Amino acid sequence: MIAATIGKTFLKTFNEKTGKNYSAKEFFEKEYFECFYNHPKYMQWITNSPFVQMKAGQKPDLLKPEERLEKLNGLHEKIEDGECDASIAIGFPASEVKEFATTSGLVSDIKPVLDKEDVYYSWIGGGLGVGIAGGYSIFFDEPEILFELYKGWQAYRKLLNDRSLSSMRGNQINTWNGQWLSYTFNKHFREDFDFTHLHNRNAISMSEKLIEVNTISWSELFFEISNKFSQKIITGYVYSLGQTNKTLGFYPFNFEKANTLRKYYATLFGEQAAIAEAKDYEALFGIHIKRACELGAIGLQALEPKDLRKYFGNDSNLKLVKPKLNNDEEKNHKALQKDYENIITFRTYKTWLLAMITKNKEESLEYTAEVARALHEYRDKASKNDRKNLIDKELLSAKSKKQFLDALVTIIKEAEKELLQIFKELRDKVHLMSAEDFGYFVVLLKFDYAFEERERN
C-alpha cells in the first residue's frame, strides 16, 4: 500500500503542475505505459506481471506495438477482475492457489477490499522508488522529489532508446532514480547533459558488452538532496522488493546534518578545500543503510565515516606519514595520491568526530589539536620511550574515562610547568564528558596526535 500512497502524492502534484486532471488509470495508460513499457526495452521488470509473461516465441525486445498493447489490456482485465497479488499490485504479497508464498510475510487469508485506482497508483509509486547500495530502495513522500523523479523517467527512456547505446541495460528504473536525484539536485546540474557527462560522474559504467547504471550509496544521495532541502526533515520508507520483500520501516531523514558537516569541514580546513574536496570526503561518510536504520533516524550518527570504528579501543598504532619523494615521477605521483587520500580520510574523520562531540555547543574546534601538540612537547622532552609508551599504550588506548584519567595523572606528575594548565583543563573536560562523547574524543585526539607527528617528521 505504500507504493499506492506514493503514487497518489505524485499524481496530485503532476496534475497541479501540468494542468491535467488524470485519474490513476489515465496516467498509467498515457504516461507510465508509454514511457516504461511501450518500447523494445522496458524500464521496469515486475515478476509475473502481464508485461513479462511471454507467449511461445515472444521476447520483450521483439514485441510488436499491438502485442505490447495486448499486455496492457491483460493488466486492465486482471485489475477489473479484482486480482491484487504482487504481480498486479506493486508491493503486495505474492500468492498461490492454496496459500500465500513462503516468501511473503505478515499476510492474511482475508482478501483485502482494494479500489481499482489504488492498483494503478501502486504501479505509479513503484516507478518512484529510489534505489541505493545495499539492495534497498527508499520512498520519499515529498512532492518535489517525486516530480523530479518523473522528469528523470524521460531522461532514462532517452538513453535506452539511443541507438548508439545499444548495450544499455533496461529495467533499472529504481537504480536510475537514485543517480538522477543525485545529479539533478547537484549544484552543477546541466540541462544539456549527455551520456559522457553521466559516465564521468560515475553514474553509469561501461564495459565491452554492457552499459548499466551504477547504484549510489545512500550517504552520497543524502548530501545531494540536502542541497535542495537544507533545512528539512523528510520521512523515507526503506524497503526491498524481490523474491523476498523486506521492510526496514519509516525513518526521518535529517538533511540539515549534511550541511553541519560541510560547515565544520570549511571551518577546519578552509572554504576552498570544502568545495574542492567535497566529492572525495562526502563519499567516505555513511554506515550501511541497514545499520543506519537501526539508529531510528538518518542523521549525523548514521553518517559515521567508513572504517572509523577500527580506531576505537586499543588500536593506537595510527600513523600519517609524509611521502618521501625521489626522481621517479610515477612513484611520486602514486605517493602523493596516497597522501592526498590519507589526508582526506583524516579530515573526514575529524569533521564527523567534532560534530558528534560538540553537538552545536560553543567549543573550540582546535582543542584536540592543541592537546596533541602538548602531548608531543611532553614526549619530546624525555630521553627514553617511557613517555611515548605511556601516551600510546595507556592514554590513547583507554577504553574508559578512569583509564584515561589514570594515565593523565602520571603525565601531570612528570609534565613541565608550562604544560600543566593544558593537562589540567583536559582532566576537567574528560571528567564531565558522557561515556559516548569520551569514546569519540579519544579517537579524535588519537588522529590529531598522529597528524601532529606527521607534521613534525
Image (cartoon, grey):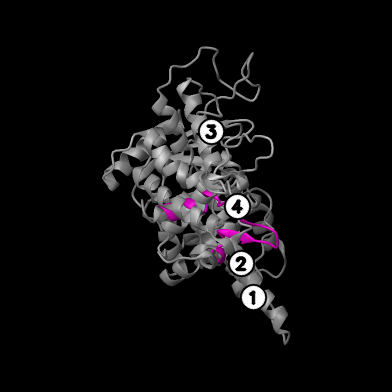
Q: Which residue is mark 4?
A: 306
Q: Position of residue 80 (x, y in %)?
A: 45, 23
Residue at x-position 49% and y-position 65%: 194
Which is in the foreground here, disc 2 or disc 3? 3
Could you tell which of marks 4 and 3 lies nearer the N-terminus?
A: 3
Looking at this view, is 179 or 333 the one in front?
179
Q: Position of residue 345 (x, y in %)?
A: 58, 62
Looking at this view, is 345 or 222 the one in front?
222
Question: Which quarter of the figure is the N terminus placed in?
Answer: top left
Mark 4 burial class by Cα count in 10 Å: few <14, some 14-19, many 20+: some
Q: CA distance from mark 3 to mark 1?
A: 42 Å
Position above or below: 28 against 365: above
Q: Which residue is mark 2?
A: 341
**Does residue 339 show up magenta in the picture?**
no
Mark 1 burial class by Cα count in 10 Å: few <14, some 14-19, many 20+: some
Q: Amino acid at mark 4?
A: Lys
Q: Position of residue 372 (x, y in %)?
A: 55, 63
Q: Which residue is mark 3?
A: 248
Q: CA distance from mark 2 to mark 4?
A: 14 Å
Q: Which residue is mark 1?
A: 336
Which is in the foreground here, disc 3 or disc 1? 3
